Image: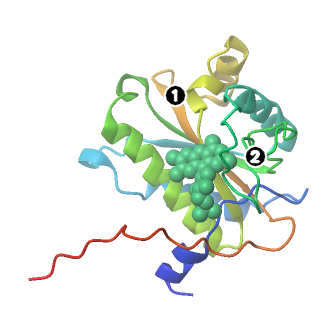
Amino acid sequence: MDLLSMMKHRRSIRKYQNRPVEWEKLEKIAEAGIYAPNPGGRQGTKVIMLDDAELIETIGIVNADCENRNWNGRSVSADQPSIIDDLSIKSGFYGCPALGVVCIQKILKTHVNAIGAAFVTAQNMVMEAYALDVSSCIVGRAEATFEKPEMQALLAKWGLDEEYMPLVFVCLGYIDGPYPTAKPRSEGRLLYIKK
Ligand SMILES: Cc1cc2nc3c(=O)[nH]c(=O)nc-3n(C[C@H](O)[C@H](O)[C@H](O)COP(=O)(O)O)c2cc1C
């Protein structure tokens, strides 16, 4: 499949099999992340990859608890319900067996370029995952998730430099059920100015 077709067909997946993702694939996905464009050529993002499903579930529950889940009936996805759509989902990581954690420097946490760098890193990871038949979902609320001392202790245990903080997550795993169809695009989002 060419790249544009891949981008059109990729979906955010929130139903995962209880089956690990091979480290050979996880390493390629993490590597794709650090090849993303980065502001000023600073290569300022770091990617943590973990495959401890139990630990991921523990962090995911904290992550879900950081979200205000009362969105007054607004729906994210009917075929891949999010924690907003289905209040019975306990983990913001949807039971995924592997997790990418994209980190930025704390001092840049409000800088639009640093935030952008984290998300393009995540996007590279999502596309590499799709190319490897691994499903994914970008998930936010990383700063809030790691606020508590016990969560900060995890970062220290993982050996993350103290000057860095998690900014965005990438859930990874094999899809449980059929792959959902591509979402049509809303009208009027492209404006071509031709000479
Ligand atoms: C910046 C960003 C943050 C997101 N945060 C979450 C999140 O916290 N939880 C979640 O389930 N999905 C999250 N998503 C996934 C979006 O809900 C998803 O991309 C959107 O609904 C479109 O669906 P699609 O990716 O299947 O096309 C996020 C996506 C982006 C780009």
Question: Which residue is located at x 68 percent, y 50 percent?
Answer: 75
Q: Quadrant of residue 141?
A: top right
- Amino acid tagged 2: Asp
How far is the residue under mark 1 from the one under mark 2? 28 Å
Q: Nearer the viewer, residue 176 or 128?
A: 176
95 is higher (above) or lower (below) than 36: above
Asked if residue 100 can be seen in this view, the reply is no
**Where is residue 7 shown, x and y percent of the image?**
52, 73
Q: Secondary structure at mark 2?
A: loop
Residues tagged 1 and 2 counted as in contact (Cβ below 8 A)? no
Does mark 1 have its CB less than 8 Å from ligand 1?
no
Q: Nearer the viewer, residue 125 or 62?
A: 62
The image shows a total of numbered marks equal to 2
Q: Residues within 10 Å of mark 2 (few under 14, many from 20)?
A: some
Quadrant in the picture for the N terminus: bottom right
Task: Look at mark 1 in the image and give the residue it sits on.
Answer: 165
Q: Is residue 81 shown left or right of residue 54?
A: left
Earlier sequence position, callout 1 versus callout 2: 2
Question: Foreground: 89 or 188?
Answer: 188
Residue at 79%, 47% (x, y): give it: 94
Where, by quadrant of the figure, is residue 181 drawn?
Answer: bottom right
- Specify the amino acid type for callout 1: Met
The residue sitting at 26% across, 71% down in the picture is 191
Q: Residue at x 75, y 42 (%)?
A: 83
